[in-house]
């Protein structure tokens, strides 16, 4: 696209990266629109995992974007100097990518070119998503020059086949990066571009070995060809990555605190990993079904297994938060029910029994154990029966 300079903004006294448009592309209206679109899009995205933009403009015929100056390197270069990343490090990187891209998706912006070269790793291991130059085009079909929007090795099947692209294309691309970081190779790379495209459309990646089962399942869901079966959002992917990360952190703690031979340690890790994953899934299901007593009981079992681990405090906080949400909802429904039952009582007094019953049923939908609603409903039903018997006898 152009050259990036290091500069100083005299107004804010900060180092900035000044991205300029390649002079060769000045006469290309599409490239110019793409350049300014990137600045416009980045200006709408304020997130710790997306590069910040300070200014967009033109000076002496040169178009530029002044953005946050980053100390570090792109992910593709980072991999070269860190060829054997730990699983926790990989999970941490990809989770941050998901969070940044999720913010873009929440603004109805699709990146469309997620790849290691567009992911920046700061010196403190913080992640920034870069280059929204091809983001948010109205359609994602082939350009007039016959080029597919996006970088071949990382694009989704629908970007190749010319279907309308949505946020799930970015999820696929992130899945490719996740697979590549773990396996050390791109899952679809072929001998040439055509073979790579065919692989993306038709071939499933080789199964990964020595990874936790939940992670293997997540990668499969991110890389499925049928986007309707793909992970529904980057937010969901980030949540699953966080859960897997916590489990790995737990296993590291056990390894540090236990002196066993490798074979026994591996067996114990495998057992603990499976057990923790099961307990966390049970807790999440209990929270969803609002059976908080079950959630606390399962957490107690987990706490006995791994006492004093940070995961326990986080789960305790999650249960308390759910408990608070339920209490607040119950208060709201009680207040709502009070007004509705007052109306039902008035309708019953006016002998509008059917309408009174309907109001009571609405109350019971949200509060099945509400005794007042049950009494008013039962009274109205009885009065209706008496009324109908009189009509029949007459």
Image: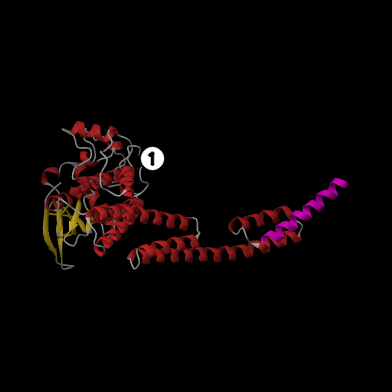
Circle 1 residue: 228
Q: Main secondary structure of the magenta part?
A: helix
Q: Quadrant of residue 304?
A: bottom left
Q: Is disc 1 placed on a helix, strand or loop? A: helix
Q: Position of residue 290 (x, y in %)?
A: 50, 58
Give the x, y percent position of residue 188: 22, 37
Bounds of the magenta segment? 373-394
Q: Residue at x 19, y 48 (%)?
A: 116
Q: How many callouts does the rendering have?
A: 1
Examine the rendered structure and indicate whether residue 281 appears above or below residue 150. below
How is the structure coloured here? secondary structure
Q: Is residue 113 visible?
A: no
Q: Residue at x 36, y 51 (%)?
A: 236
Left or right: 24 as drawn, with respect to 151: left
Q: Position of residue 183 (x, y in %)?
A: 21, 45
* Residue 350: quarter of image: bottom right
Asked if one can make out residue 196 in the rendered structure from this viewpoint, the answer is yes
Query: Magenta span has 325?
Result: no
Q: In which quadrant of the rendered view does residue 86 lie?
A: bottom left
Q: Where 346 sits versus 181, above or below? A: below
Q: Nearer the viewer, residue 69 or 143?
A: 69
Towards the viewer: 124 or 105: 124
Q: Dot 1, crowdedness within 10 Å: few (<14), some or many (≥20)?
A: few
Q: In this view of the protein, which residue sits in the foreground, 189 or 194?
A: 189
Residue 306, position as x, y percentages in the image: 34, 63
């Amino acid at each position: 696209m152009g050259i990036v300079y290091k500069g100083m903004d005299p107004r804010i006294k900060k180092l900035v990266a000044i991205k300029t448009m390649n002079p060769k592309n000045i006469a290309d209206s599409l490239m110019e629109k793409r350049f300014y679109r990137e600045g416009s899009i980045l200006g709408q995205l304020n997130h710790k995992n997306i590069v910040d933009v300070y200014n967009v403009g033109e000076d002496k015929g040169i178009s530029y974007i002044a953005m946050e100056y980053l100390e570090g390197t792109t992910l593709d270069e980072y991999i070269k100097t860190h060829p054997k990343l730990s699983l926790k490090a990989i999970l941490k990187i990809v989770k941050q990518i998901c969070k940044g891209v999720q913010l873009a998706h929440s603004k109805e912006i699709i990146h469309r070119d997620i790849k290691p070269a567009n992911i920046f790793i700061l010196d403190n291991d913080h992640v920034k998503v870069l280059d929204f130059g091809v983001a948010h085009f109205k359609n994602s079909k082939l350009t007039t020059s016959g080029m597919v929007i996006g970088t071949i090795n990382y694009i989704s099947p629908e970007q190749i086949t010319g279907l309308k692209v949505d946020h799930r294309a970015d999820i696929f691309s992130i899945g490719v990066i996740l697979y590549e970081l773990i396996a050390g190779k791109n899952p679809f790379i072929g001998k040439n571009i055509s073979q790579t495209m065919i692989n993306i459309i038709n071939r499933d990646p080789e199964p990964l070995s020595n990874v936790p089962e939940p992670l293997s399942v997540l990668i499969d869901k991110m890389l499925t060809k049928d986007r309707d079966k793909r992970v529904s959002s980057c937010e969901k992917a980030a949540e699953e990555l966080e859960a897997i990360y916590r489990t790995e952190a737990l296993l590291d703690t056990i390894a540090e605190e236990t002196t066993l031979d490798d074979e026994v340690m591996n067996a114990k890790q495998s057992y603990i990993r499976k057990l923790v994953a099961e307990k966390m899934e049970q807790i999440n299901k209990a929270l969803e079904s609002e059976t908080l007593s079950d959630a606390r009981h399962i957490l107690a079992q987990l706490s006995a297994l791994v006492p004093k681990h940070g995961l326990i405090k986080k789960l305790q906080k999650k249960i308390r938060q759910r408990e608070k949400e339920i209490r607040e909802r119950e208060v709201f429904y009680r207040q709502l029910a009070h007004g509705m039952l007052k109306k039902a009582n008035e309708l019953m007094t006016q002998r509008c029994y059917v309408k009174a019953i309907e109001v009571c049923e609405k109350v019971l939908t949200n509060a099945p154990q509400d005794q007042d609603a049950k009494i008013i409903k039962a009274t109205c039903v009885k009065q209706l029966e008496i009324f109908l018997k009189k009509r029949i006898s007459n």
